[in-house]
């Protein structure tokens, strides 16, 4: 995430290593952006090039260097040429383009910068469902990324529980809530260990395989409402097949650029 003297992202310098080490999450370096961990891989992000880093990480932490890359921020991930956008009466704006009354956020280097269709679809569906069936006392944000869904849910007045396995997503979501003086509980965990999530609304912008697995678990089907995305129209049939005959019915469907978002309600108490 951004720390002085940096107030925006320009170029990302990435260094990937096999293995992980908890000390790398808080690496002492003024140019350090963050540490991405996934399975048995660590990727370190910097604002500036660090040619001596591979040797240092090997010496101090015993991790083998895999590769490095230099990427313009606008080309990273789902695209980071970011502008303010509006959901209902709320404006979301990157911290370097913030305006009075906006929900400001540091997009960091994790998923959920606001540019991807699934993020916008989820935000739009949340606002629409809040008007139709809200207010919700409890909202769960599963796979919280940079925390945009948590920002909107907390701003609307819900008690938020945000979950992600990636420590960088967890720290960024906490940071973005704090930037807006909003509250929410943010956990680094495998969301399956937190089941059941009873009552309220579940927001799950996850990959298709995990959604299929979760929808097959009775312990996942305890909330009142669900908003699901992270899958394309070509994958939708598999999810609908899992839903068929179950306790959830589809209330609404949205699609953007081939990506789909479903809003569901539990019909069985």
Image (cartoon, rainbow, N blue to C red):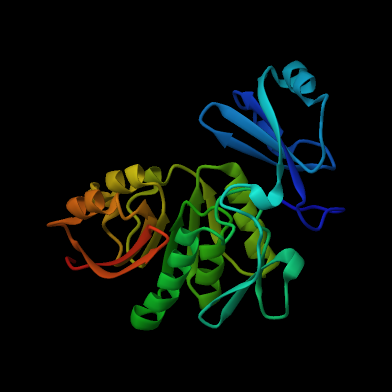
Residue 46: name its quadrant: top right
Question: Which of 251/73 is in front?
Answer: 73
Q: Nearer the viewer, residue 126 or 235?
A: 235
Closer-to-camera residue (225/161): 225
- In the figure, is residue 196 to the left or right of 85? left
Query: 74 left or right of 142?
Result: right
Viewer-proximal residue, 204 or 61?
204
The residue sitting at 34% across, 47% down in the picture is 208
Residue 191 coordinates in the image, percent (x, y): 41, 46
Report x, y in % for residue 210. 35, 44
Q: Examine the rendering and report whether any part of residue 135 can be seen.
A: no
Q: Name the residue at the right extreme.
A: 5
The picture places residue 229, in percent across and down from the top left corner, at 38, 57
Q: Is residue 36 depicted above or below 111 in this figure? A: above
Placement of 167 over or under 158, stated as above or below = above
Q: Residue pushed farthest left? A: 245
Q: Where does the C terminus fall, quadrant-wise? A: bottom left
**From where the camera sits, is residue 110 visible?**
yes
Q: Which residue is drawn at 79% across and 21% down?
A: 56
What residue do we see at 22% from left, 52% from top?
A: 237
Please state if 67 lies on the left or on the right of 217 as rendered: right
Disc tally is 0
| Percent x, y of residue 1 | 71, 51
- Locate residue 19: give its quadrant: top right
The residue drawn where x is 45% and y is 59% is: 118
């Amino acid at each position: 995430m951004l720390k002085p003297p940096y107030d925006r992202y320009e170029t990302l310098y990435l260094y990937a290593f096999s293995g992980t080490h908890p000390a790398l999450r808080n690496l002492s370096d003024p140019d350090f952006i963050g540490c991405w961990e996934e399975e048995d891989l660590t990727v370190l992000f910097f604002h500036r090039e660090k040619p001596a880093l591979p040797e240092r990480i090997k010496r101090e932490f015993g991790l083998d260097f895999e590769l490095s890359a230099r990427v313009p921020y606008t080309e990273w991930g789902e695209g980071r040429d970011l502008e303010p956008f509006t959901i209902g009466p709320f404006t979301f704006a990157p911290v370097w383009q913030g305006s009075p009354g906006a929900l400001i956020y540091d997009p960091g280097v994790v998923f959920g910068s606001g540019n991807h269709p699934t993020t916008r679809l989820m935000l739009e569906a949340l606002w629409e469902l809040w008007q139709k069936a809200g207010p919700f006392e409890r909202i769960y944000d599963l796979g919280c990324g940079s925390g945009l869904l948590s920002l909107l849910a907390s701003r609307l007045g819900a008690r938020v529980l945000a979950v992600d396995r990636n420590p960088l997503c967890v720290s960024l979501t906490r940071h973005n809530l704090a930037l807006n003086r909003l509250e929410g509980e943010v956990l680094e965990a495998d969301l399956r260990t937190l089941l059941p999530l009873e009552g309220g609304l579940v927001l799950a912008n996850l990959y298709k395989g995990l959604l299929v697995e979760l929808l097959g678990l009775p312990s996942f089907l305890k909330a009142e409402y669900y908003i699901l995305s992270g899958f394309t129209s070509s994958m939708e049939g598999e999810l609908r097949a899992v839903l068929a005959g179950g306790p959830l019915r589809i209330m609404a469907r949205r699609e953007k650029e081939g990506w789909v978002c479903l809003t569901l309600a539990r019909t069985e108490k």
